[in-house]
Amino acid sequence: MATSLFADRTDAGRRLAEVLKAKTITRPVVVAIPRGGVPVGVEIARGLACPLKLIVLRKLFIPHNPEAGFGAMAPDGTVSVDEEFVAQLGMSHTEVAEVIRQVRTELTQRRRLYESVSGDDVQGRDAILVDDGIAAGYSMSAAARRSSVSDSSSMTSSA
């Protein structure tokens, strides 16, 4: 069983905020990935006294193992698929298409839920991408490629 460095997500956010305070970050904005990244992001934004923005995206889950993924879908519906991994998994085009359909539906619902709390734009700011962990990195990669995040002055990821 893995040992966590932090008591919980709130503790992680507070401690990461302290580390980030020691860095030279101009005009920071925290960009958190719901759900797990939000409690971490809230504490970082609070500690740095900066805006919090949510980026709603979803991992493309492996049907027999929904905790694992083979890609991600960005807020605008752009899909990134690890084709080599899909081939290793033996997934058919039909299975991939069905996962994408399910994720697109869920992403639309989540965008409606989280849209009102999105916060400031990141253009010209130092973006701090936050999630509660990185397994394969598909969600974090999709967040980094998202156009509004890529317009930031610099990017730091925290998971």
Image (spheres, grey):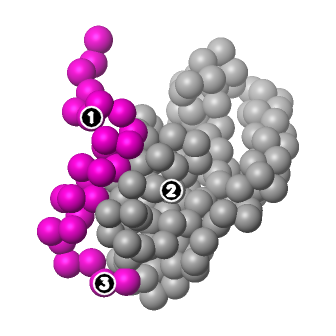
Would you say 67 lies left or right of 128 here? right
Q: Quadrant of residue 86?
A: top right
Q: Which residue is mark 3?
A: 26
Name the residue located 15 percent from the left edge and 68 percent from the top edge: 22
Would you say 104 lies left or right of 36 here? right
Would you say 40 lies left or right of 3 here? right
**Disc 3 to disc 2, C-alpha distance:** 18 Å
Return the residue nearer the eye: 137 or 39.
39
Specify the quadrant that holds the N terminus. Answer: top left
For the residues bearing labels 3 and 2, Cβ distance under 8 angstroms: no
Q: Which residue is mark 1?
A: 6
| Mark 3 Cα shell of 10 Å, populated few (<14), some (14-19), many (≥20) | few
Q: Secondary structure at mark 3?
A: loop
- Mark 1 or mark 2: whose residue is earlier in sequence: 1
Q: Amino acid at mark 1?
A: Phe
Q: Which residue is mark 2?
A: 32
- Mark 3 or mark 1: whose residue is earlier in sequence: 1
Point out the stretch of residues depicted in magenta.
Answer: 1-27
Q: Can residue 45 be seen?
A: yes
For the residues bearing labels 1 and 2, Cβ distance under 8 angstroms: no
Q: Amino acid at mark 2?
A: Ala
